[in-house]
């Protein structure tokens, strides 16, 4: 289910202020990482964090929602040549511009 960014931000901030809800989450999840204790965050979780257009879009959404961005990845993941997503990350194209005529 998708909702507009403004509605999601409003709901997130409303839930953040509910201490009973936060306690239920702690009981269910156990100890939360310190990075989630002080403020709500915009999170992008990927096998390999990559400086690509998806990441730029994520940063743009985080900025619009006034949330600090946080990129997370698996630290015990292994590289496998059968995973085309990981193989493609081995040789990243580099762009000089975000708009107009992109140069690789």
Image: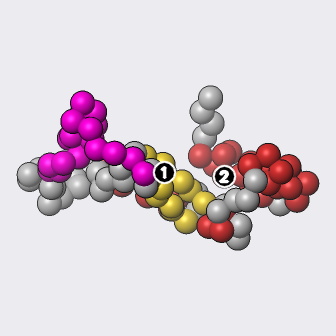
10 Å neighbourhood of mark 1: few (<14), some, or many (≥20)?
some
Mark 1 residue element: strand
Mark 1 — residue? 44
Q: Quadrant of the N terminus?
A: top right
- Residue 64's spot in the image, x, y percent? 53, 58
Is-magenta flag for residue 90?
Answer: yes
Q: Does residue 47 appear anywhere in the picture? A: yes
Q: Residue at x 48, y 48 (%)?
A: 45
Label 2 near label 1: C-beta < 8 Å?
A: no
Instruction: Please state the extent of the stretch shown in magenta in the rendering.
Output: 76-93
Mark 2 — residue? 9
38 relative to 64 in the view: left or right: right
24 relative to 81 in the view: left or right: right
**Residue 96, relative to residue 11: is it above or below?**
below
Which SS type dominates the magenta stretch?
Answer: loop
Pick the front one: 54 or 90: 90
52 relative to 69 in the view: left or right: left
- Residue 74's spot in the image, x, y percent? 44, 50
* Discs 1/2, front: 1
Q: Residue at x 88, y 59 (%)?
A: 19
Pick the front one: 73 or 39: 73
Mark sitting earlier along the chain (1/2): 2
- Total number of numbered discs in the rendering: 2
Q: Residue at x 79, y 50 (%)?
A: 25
101 relative to 86 in the view: left or right: left
Mark 2 residue element: helix
- Residue 4's spot in the image, x, y percent? 60, 40
Q: Residue at x 34, y 45 (%)?
A: 78
Is-magenta flag for residue 69?
Answer: no
Q: CA–CA distance between discs 1 and 2?
A: 16 Å
């Amino acid at each position: 289910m998708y909702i507009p960014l403004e509605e999601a931000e409003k709901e997130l901030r409303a839930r953040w202020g509910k201490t009973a809800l936060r306690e239920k989450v702690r009981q269910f999840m156990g100890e939360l990482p310190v990075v989630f204790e002080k403020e709500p965050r915009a999170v992008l979780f990927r096998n390999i964090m990559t400086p690509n257009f998806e990441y730029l879009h994520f940063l743009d959404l985080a900025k619009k929602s006034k949330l600090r961005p946080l990129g997370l990845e698996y630290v015990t993941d292994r590289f496998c040549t059968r995973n085309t997503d990981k193989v493609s990350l081995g040789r990243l194209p580099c762009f000089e511009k975000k708009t107009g005529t992109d140069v690789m």
